[in-house]
Image: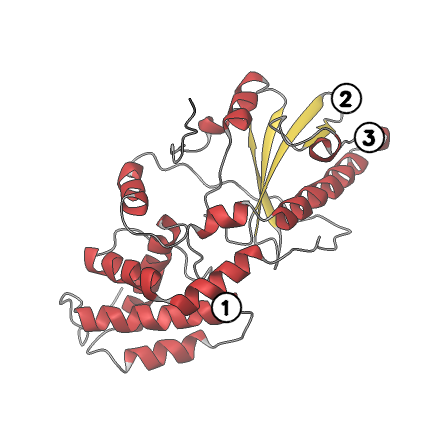
Amino acid sequence: MATDRSYTRRPWSRLEVEAVVADYFQMLRLELAGQKYNKSAHRKAVLAKLVSRSPGSVELKHQNISAILLEFGAPWIEGYKPMGNYQQLLFEIVEERLLSDDEFDAVATSAVERPAVIPEADNFAGLVVSAPVIRRSEDKSKSLRNRFRRGVKRDYLALEQHNRALGKSGEEYVLRYERYRLHQLGAAKLADRIEHVAKTKGDGLGYDVQSFESNGKERLIEVKTTSFGLEAPFYVSRTELDVSKEKSELYQLYRLFDFRDRPRMYQLKGPVDRHCILDPVSYRARF
């Protein structure tokens, strides 16, 4: 592939990185607030502040910023898929921005805490997608150190996890999907027996929905819902992990993502730690 040699390969300066980060955060604030913006116009404007940088290099910086925000448990622009291998200077400037940008904090907090409505759906075709593939070669411990040993104003993904309206809407959506799935398999009687156990029996079972396979075998479903994209991490309790192992043949975790805009879902069958790298992020202290 031919390259344009008018663009240099020199290291990015602090001023250049600050300009790209500021522009990214402006787009992100608008997106979280539900306001429209033009990515091409933003890219053109920021390129005018840089010297001999290509549109592709700015695009890559945007993807790097998404990856850093993901490490910090913050929202990112989904159109810029997270991409690792970023420069330390970029990490530091994004971190500084997270700590100092009160407007972003207010908009992001509002976005993850606002109530959710169950999306209408008569046909669930296209809902289920492939789960992300685990990347064991990456140094996850490094990202954890970055996230929890440095100054972080707020873990927005954890905050969203406690949004009960979003969680319950996700569970209700899965109930509808399960009834649809069993009807499609010709098991209407089983569809009528599906139980929302998180509602009828409480939250401590390690799963939210008791459904069935077409042969009558139980399917125990834990539902995790996010407004963010496919790559968003989720939190798993000790009970959920234990049940996923003890009842591995029955257990499935349904991860709903992009829930507010265009819900999609992937499924993890059996022990959760078979599919994900689990990071111990908290402990319960007792006497």
Q: Which mark is in front, 1 or 3?
A: 1
The kind of secondary structure element at disc 3 is loop
Kindly identify the amino acid type of the residue bearing the numbered disc 3: Ala
Residue tagged by mark 1? Answer: 31
Kindly identify the amino acid type of the residue bearing the numbered disc 2: Gly
Q: Quadrant of residue 102?
A: bottom left
The kind of secondary structure element at disc 1 is helix
Q: Examine the rendered structure and indicate whether residue 245 appears above or below residue 131.
A: above
Question: x, y percentage for residue 33?
Answer: 53, 69
**Residue 148 visible, this angle:** yes
Q: Quadrant of the N terminus?
A: bottom left
* Nearer to us in this view, 123 or 87: 87
Q: Which mark is in front, 1 or 2?
A: 1
Residue neighbourhood size for the residue with mark 1, other residues' Cα within 10 Å, grouped as few (<14), some (14–19), many (≥20)? some
Q: Earlier in the sequence, mark 1 or mark 3?
A: 1
The kind of secondary structure element at disc 2 is loop
Q: CA distance from mark 1 to mark 3?
A: 42 Å
Q: Quadrant of residue 252?
A: top right
**Residue 4 visible, this angle:** no
Tag on residue 187?
A: 3
Q: Earlier in the sequence, mark 1 or mark 2?
A: 1
Q: Answer with left or right where residue 207 lies relative to residue 143.
A: right
Question: x, y percentage for residue 53?
Answer: 23, 74
Q: Answer with left or right where residue 20 lies relative to residue 13.
A: right
Question: x, y percentage for residue 173?
Answer: 70, 46
Q: Residue at x 64, y 56 (%)?
A: 115
Tag on residue 216?
A: 2
